[in-house]
Image (cartoon, rainbow, N blue to C red):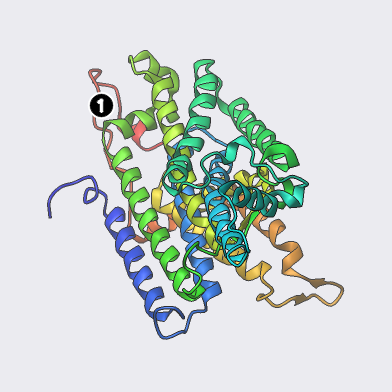
């Protein structure tokens, strides 16, 4: 097998094989393409889970490898969902309006159709005019570009302002959280142009495909999510495998030393921050059509905190760990909050998992942080017998005493 960035680390090939087998298995068992063992709603849940795994991989790049604890990456995820949601809602409403006006004695003008579409979409917030942000909502191609352009531009501007000021550590985390909160509060307003608290709905209905059952559409989105995760994972593996990845890890471990060596630390951080925001936008654009609705609550800071928890539980600094953490927590959360987990009768109190799940998740995060800092990925390391190199006190560096046996034993 040729020595490539994928084959140098066996976990990369294993992850892609497992993903492919999983996607094929779901396709065979799904209601829309196979024997019907897996329901359409659960196929959508699995597709959304793959999207969450993709944004977790992006989060691992920026936090696990570069050391930037961003508490705002789910904002980029939500912006990607809003961009594609605008086109889905416009195109679907356009079809409904044109169909309803088809039997009118006098054919409607284009302006009348646009006014009717605006009234249908924005009537819920007391308006009928299209805001400026909807200027390209009728163009699928432009909105697809905006899926990556809008999160990328926001990350570029925010990152440039933050990194050039050399804001690091907890202060940078607070700033990213403040950015997310400000964006969410703005979107909650009715005059934001995105229907305020109502958000965008009906996104599961693809324009022009009303005759296609949701069972079939769910499989399409599931495969799109699987392909996006595979491509995102390959990109991330390529990024961390070479010199660029070494500099990323150097910034994480000792930013001052990397800067002293002559590297543009701010440039590296800005690239990673912007690239991962664009990946998050793609994940959001695939997630919300499967969810069917998006509103400002999805961008609230707590969502970005959950994202950090997923990566920590999975094991940051390991791409497969981030994906495993997102998949594990997402599926367990669906089981506990979906009413499938039976209530636990303690005699003096009945424990309802719907109410206690978030507490269990927070407690799990604390336990992982204290006792298993490598997360679930650490278990994989034990299984594969991954160990640090045994140097036996060999000399490292120009100084003959750089590393001695007594130091190696510590």
Which residue does the image show at 53% across and 31% down from the upper left?
154
Where is residue 348 shown, x and y percent of the image? Answer: 87, 74
* 211 relative position to 344: left or right: left
Which residue does the image show at 34% across and 72% down from the upper left?
24
Res. 52 visible in picture: yes
Say which of 121 and 272 sits in front.
121
* 178 relative position to 388: left or right: right
| Quadrant of image for the C terminus | top left
Where is residue 191 shown, x and y percent of the image? Answer: 73, 38
* 70 relative position to 410: left or right: right
The quarter holding residue 246 reads top left
| Quadrant of image for the N terminus | bottom left
Where is residue 248 shown, x and y percent of the image? Answer: 38, 31
The relative height of residue 193 versus residue 30 in the rendered view (above or below) is above
The quarter holding residue 237 reads top left
Residue sticking out furthest to the right: 348
Res. 366 visible in picture: no
Mark 1: give few (<14), some (14-19) or many (20+) Cα within 10 Å. Answer: few
Say which of 30 and 410 sits in front.
30
The relative height of residue 181 versus residue 214 in the rendered view (above or below) is above
> Count of labels shown?
1
Say which of 207 and 107 sits in front.
107
Where is residue 331 shown, x and y percent of the image? Answer: 55, 66
Q: Is mark 1 on a helix, strand or loop?
A: loop
- Report the residue marked by disc 1: 396
Which residue does the image show at 56% across and 56% down from the upper left?
94
* 410 relative position to 90: left or right: left
Say which of 120 and 241 sits in front.
120
Residue sticking out furthest to the left: 2
């Amino acid at each position: 097998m040729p020595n490539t960035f994928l084959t140098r680390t066996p976990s990369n090939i294993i992850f892609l094989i497992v993903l492919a087998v999983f996607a094929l298995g779901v396709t065979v068992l799904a209601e829309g393409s196979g024997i019907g063992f897996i329901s359409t709603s659960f196929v959508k849940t699995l597709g959304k889970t793959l999207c969450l795994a993709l944004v977790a991989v992006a989060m691992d790049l920026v936090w696990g490898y570069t050391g930037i604890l961003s508490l705002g990456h789910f904002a980029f995820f939500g912006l990607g969902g809003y961009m594609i949601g605008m086109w889905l809602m416009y195109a679907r409403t356009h079809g409904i309006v044109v169909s309803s006006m088809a039997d009118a004695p006098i054919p409607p003008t284009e302006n009348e159709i646009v006014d009717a579409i605006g009234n249908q979409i924005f009537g819920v917030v007391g308006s009928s005019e299209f805001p400026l942000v909807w200027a390209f909502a009728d163009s699928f191609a432009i909105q697809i570009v905006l899926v990556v352009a809008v999160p990328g531009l926001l990350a570029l501007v925010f990152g440039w302002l933050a990194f050039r000021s050399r804001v690091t550590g907890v202060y940078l985390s607070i700033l990213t959280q403040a950015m997310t909160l400000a964006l969410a509060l703005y979107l909650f307003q009715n005059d934001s142009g995105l229907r305020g608290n109502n958000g965008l709905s009906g996104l599961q209905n693809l324009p022009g495909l009303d005759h296609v059952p949701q069972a079939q559409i769910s499989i399409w989105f599931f495969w799109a999510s699987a392909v996006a995760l595979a491509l995102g994972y390959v990109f991330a593996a390529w990024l961390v495998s070479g010199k660029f990845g070494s500099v990323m890890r150097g910034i994480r471990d000792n930013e001052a030393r990397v800067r002293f060596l002559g590297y543009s630390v701010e440039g590296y951080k800005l690239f990673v921050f912007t690239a991962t925001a664009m990946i998050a936008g793609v994940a959001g654009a695939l997630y919300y059509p499967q969810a069917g609705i998006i509103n400002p609550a999805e961008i609230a800071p707590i969502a970005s905190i959950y994202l950090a928890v997923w990566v920590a539980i999975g094991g940051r600094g390991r791409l497969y760990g981030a994906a495993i953490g997102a998949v594990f927590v997402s599926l367990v959360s669906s089981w506990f909050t979906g009413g499938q987990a039976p209530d636990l009768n303690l005699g003096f109190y009945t424990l309802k998992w719907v109410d206690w799940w978030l507490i269990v998740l927070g407690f799990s995060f604390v336990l992982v942080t204290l006792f298993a800092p490598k997360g679930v990925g650490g278990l994989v390391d034990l299984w594969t017998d991954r160990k640090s190199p045994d140097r036996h006190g060999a000399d490292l560096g120009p100084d003959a005493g750089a590393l001695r046996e007594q130091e190696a034993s510590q």
